[in-house]
Amino acid sequence: MDMVVCVKRVPDTAESEVHIDSSGRDIDKGRLSFGINEADNYAVEEAIQIKERDGGTVTVISLGGKESDEQIRMALAKGGDEAVRLEDPAFAGSDGLAIAKALAAAVKDLKYDIIFTGALADDDAFGAVGVAMAELLGVNHAAYVKKVEIAGDKIKVGRELEGGLLEFVEMDLPAVLTIQTGINEPRYASFKGIKLAAKKEIELKSAADLGLDASEIGEAGAWAKLEKFTPPVVGEMAEILEGEPEETASRLAGILKEKGLV
Amino acid sequence: MLFELAEEERLFRSMVRDFAEGEIRPKVDELWEKGEFPYGIIEKMGELGIMGIPWPERYGGSGGDYLSYVIAVEELARVESTCAITLEAHISLGSSPLYYFGTEEQKQEILVPLARGEKLAAFGLTEPEAGSDAGNTKTTAVLDGDEWVINGTKCFITNAGTDISAGVTVTAVTGQDDGKSAISNIFVPKDTPGYNIAPKYKKMGWHASDTRELSFSDCRVPASNIIGKQGEGFCQFLYCLDGGRIAIAGLAIGNAQGCLEECMKYVKERVQFGKPIASFQAIRFKLADMATQIELARNLAYKAAALRDAGKPHTKEAAMAKLFASEMCMAAATQAVQIFGGYGFMDEYPVSRFFRDAKILEIGEGTSEIQRIVIARELGI
Ligand SMILES: Cc1cc2nc3c(=O)[nH]c(=O)nc-3n(C[C@H](O)[C@H](O)[C@H](O)COP(=O)(O)OP(=O)(O)OC[C@H]3O[C@@H](n4cnc5c(N)ncnc54)[C@H](O)[C@@H]3O)c2cc1C
């Protein structure tokens, strides 16, 4: 089984205060710490577990600056074989689709059975890259995958639905799977693994190397354009309910009834 | 001069941080309350190569540098101190004499399982009458045929009484040299008859770490268990202690960093006089001082570790790092409790534990007074 895992370096915003920067189109990342996107960490683990069970290779790909090498190497340290990083000023302003174009261009010449991505990025939360990539490559896909079973050249995957239900679908390989957190228990890299990974080469590819024209990628190739960030505005008609969920839910139900909306 | 870690060291740090967050953080309360030795965590640390970071792979280690090991101790202590001190005593005190001064056979036989984390190492220097005055060792080892016969008592020994302890390297008087006791280091396996292990001490902090009194009564070990040459024990443990002091500085920096992070969260949440206490200058200045002192201690400790890695003299820098970092940590923990007010005095608040774990750092592996003696001596006065 030859596999590709796409990983993204993201700022850790869970415990920090987030401020909009002076451009108005990004957050101030100066004081944030960075790590691998959470769902991608599970995607890496899933690929490595399959490799350990059934053999094969795992190639790690990331679109990002030099700092992303850290996330790539950690994935190599856990059991990845090869790595590619895509970097080009032309990628700036990409949306999910433009990123998918770059990634698809990078994997299309590789031998692959499964491409893994995380289901959702912790920062921009498009949830689109994996699915768009499958479409561009003309292969099957499944999103929010929480279970993977391999049977020959087919796979059966469990997709997470509302309320924790799993929907099982079977499909032919190759396929793109976007992995949901909790599918497995991601391992820690070992010291030896890190030392080995530190010596591995990460292949660097620009837009030109990928045969991509500037008009297809980055802001030019994006369908969605980020205009500005703003904190949610509390409108005049809005009433914010505060308190415990049980309490706010019953108050909400009361209001809806009162206004004759239900 | 950018004071930046190499990529490999940054990866090590991030791996140990993830491990501490994922495997230790959820057990912090239990470790403190029950005080039971964390076998499961130590086993996992062994599997990841943390228990043998600075030793070469041919001896079961990870082939990392000393700096990476100090960073690992720091990252563990940022969350909880007993796993950090268990690692520190295991590497700097217990395993070091074997690695630096042991024979090839001793390394293959004793060091390899230690470096893999299958066994735990300890060093027995302190005695009831030989604390700071380590040269006043009363324990004796007499050669009888091809065996050393050891008699004496060691106190406050870490890692020697667990189920996975390999044994302890003790300092013992093996003769006289110009009227002074000649001290040698001898490895005593734990199952040796006459190796008596007292119950665990009840401690102010470090509840889950294993510290005990040991006594030896006609305890016989093979003559080949001596480490290095007879009479070289004193010099050997001074070299090992130089390394240990840098690692204790790492423990202090991690503990202080943990205090700072707890405070950073709390001051934004705690409201008094209608405002988060983070808005009061008195509180802001405490945090500014804490962060500044941590930065200074970290730079000093990493420098000492880098000197050790480069094979350069570092006795003075190691003593300075240990002295400054441990006193800095005590001050930071004191301020952390102050910032938490009455809640900081309560057991369930992490800063109360950080505070109690901090004090020993000014005492173990040479008290602050002894560090100042060492530094003054190194200054040439
Ligand atoms: C939890 C814990 C774990 C430990 N683990 C180990 C271990 O694994 N192995 C081991 O060998 N030891 C271990 N120790 C022992 C530790 O290293 C000693 O406690 C320490 O070195 C101090 O010795 P002491 O307690 O006898 O104090 P003392 O030497 O009696 O000191 C008492 C006071 O007198 C001061 N003092 C002493 N001499 C001088 C001087 N010349 N000038 C000025 N002031 C002086 C000291 O600074 C101190 O303030 C451990 C201790 C503890 C508490």
Image: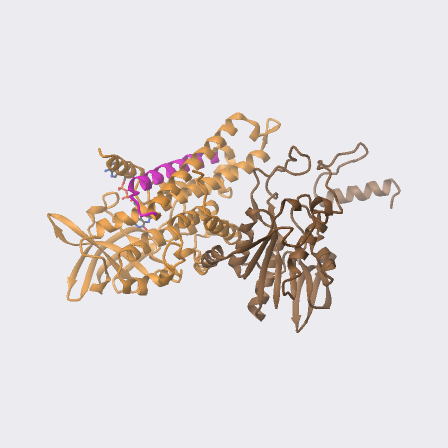
Chain colours: A brown, B orange
Q: Is residue B311 a member of the stretch shown in magenta?
A: yes
Quadrant of the image occupied by residue B312? top left
Q: Is residue B122 left or right of residue A140?
A: left
* Front in this rendered view, residue B137 or A151: A151
What secondary structure is the stretch in magenta mostly built from? helix
Compared with B25, A2 (above or below) is below
Name the image quarter holding the C terminus of chain B.
Answer: top left
Compared with A10, B332 (above or below) is above
Quadrant of the image occupied by residue B167? bottom left
Q: Which residues are magenta?
A: B310-337
Could one spot residue A67 in this view of the protein?
A: yes
Q: Which residue shows up at 25% across the image and 47% down it? A: B128
User: Residue A230 at x, y = what percent?
Assistant: 71, 36
User: Residue B86 at x, y = what percent?
Assistant: 39, 52
User: Residue B335 at x, y = what percent?
Assistant: 46, 33
Q: Is residue A193 a member of the stretch shown in magenta?
A: no
Could one spot residue A160 in this view of the protein?
A: no
Q: Is residue B317 left or right of residue A129?
A: left
* Front in this rendered view, residue A68 or B244: A68
* Front in this rendered view, residue A204 or A57: A204
Name the image quarter holding the N terminus of chain B.
Answer: top left
Q: Which residue shows up at 45% across the image and 33% down it? A: B292
Farthest residue, direction bottom: A152
Q: Quadrant of ligand 1?
A: top left
Farthest residue, direction left: B178
User: Residue B90 at x, y = what percent?
Assistant: 36, 54
Q: Is residue B157 left or right of residue A70?
A: left
Q: Which residue shows up at 59% across the image and 44% down it? A: A12
* Front in this rendered view, residue A113 or B205: A113
